[in-house]
Amino acid sequence: MEETRRHIIAADPDLDATEALRGFLEATMPLDPQRITSARVLLVLWEHSVANPELARQYRELLVSWRAELVDRIALARERGESAHDPRLGVLADEIISVAIGANVASLMHPVGELIDRYRAYVDDLMRRIAA
């Protein structure tokens, strides 16, 4: 979790909303060997959280805050004046979270870096959909 936070914080604060969203998305995807290694650690921690109620609570809180941050960033990037309560934005945020989690798990089953191009293409396509 901390590794992802560092990637997000490192994003340039001078970026426009669209590029800031792209950076936020890329920070959660397995797009380099370091993030793929971090996914291995995260997967082990998720497994431990099944038997550890406190760790499970922390992960639930992380997922809730991640979703809220995504909804806010998507609304800003779309520049349509949408409310963060618009269900369409929540659905899009849920898609992003599901893909990011799945991408991190899938990256563990392939040689390091094999799926990076696929995930970069997903982010590019997602950004086009958000702008449309």
Image (cartoon, rainbow, N blue to C red):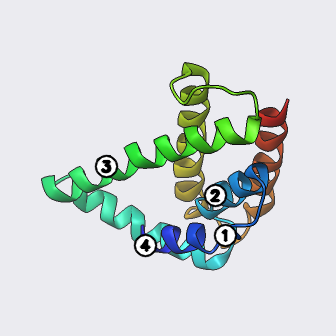
User: Mark on residue 11?
Assistant: 1
Tag 2 and tag 1, C-beta contact below 8 Å: yes
The residue depicted at 83 percent of the width and 48 percent of the height is 124
Q: Earlier in the sequence, mark 3 or mark 1?
A: 1
Say which residue label 4 marks.
2
Relative to 93, say whether 28 is above or below.
below
48 sits left or right of 8 in the view: left
The percent coordinates of residue 85 (x first, y second) are 50, 24
Determine the secondary structure under disc 2: helix
Crowding at mark 4 (Cα within 10 Å: few <14, some 14-19, many 20+): few
State which quadrant residue 109 falls in: bottom right
Q: Percent position (x, y) of residue 82?
A: 65, 25
**SS for callout 4:** helix
Please indicate whether residue 48 sits to the left or right of residue 26 in the image. Answer: left
Between the C-alphas of marks 3 and 1, the distance is: 23 Å
User: Depth-wise, is mark 4 or mark 1 nearer the camera?
Assistant: 1
Q: Residue at 68% of width from left, 67% of height from top?
A: 13
Query: Which of pointers 2 and 4 lies earlier in the amino acid sequence?
Result: 4
Is 41 left, or right, of 106 in this rendering?
Answer: left
Q: What residue type is labelled 3?
A: Glu
Indicate the quadrant where residue 104 lies. bottom right
- Mark 2 to mark 4: distance in Å? 14 Å
Could you classify mark 3 by the number of other residues whose Cα lies within 10 Å: few (under 14), some (14-19), or many (20 or more)?
Answer: few
Asked if the residues shown at circle 3 and circle 4 are in contact, with their CB atoms under 8 angstroms apart, the answer is no
Q: Determine whether 129 is above or below 125 in the image.
A: above
Amino acid type for the residue under numbered disc 2: Phe
Q: Which residue was labeled with disc 3?
A: 61
- 70, above or below 51, in the image: above
**N-terminal label among 3 and 2:** 2
The residue indicated by pointer 2 is 24
Mark 4 / mark 1, whichever is N-terminal: 4
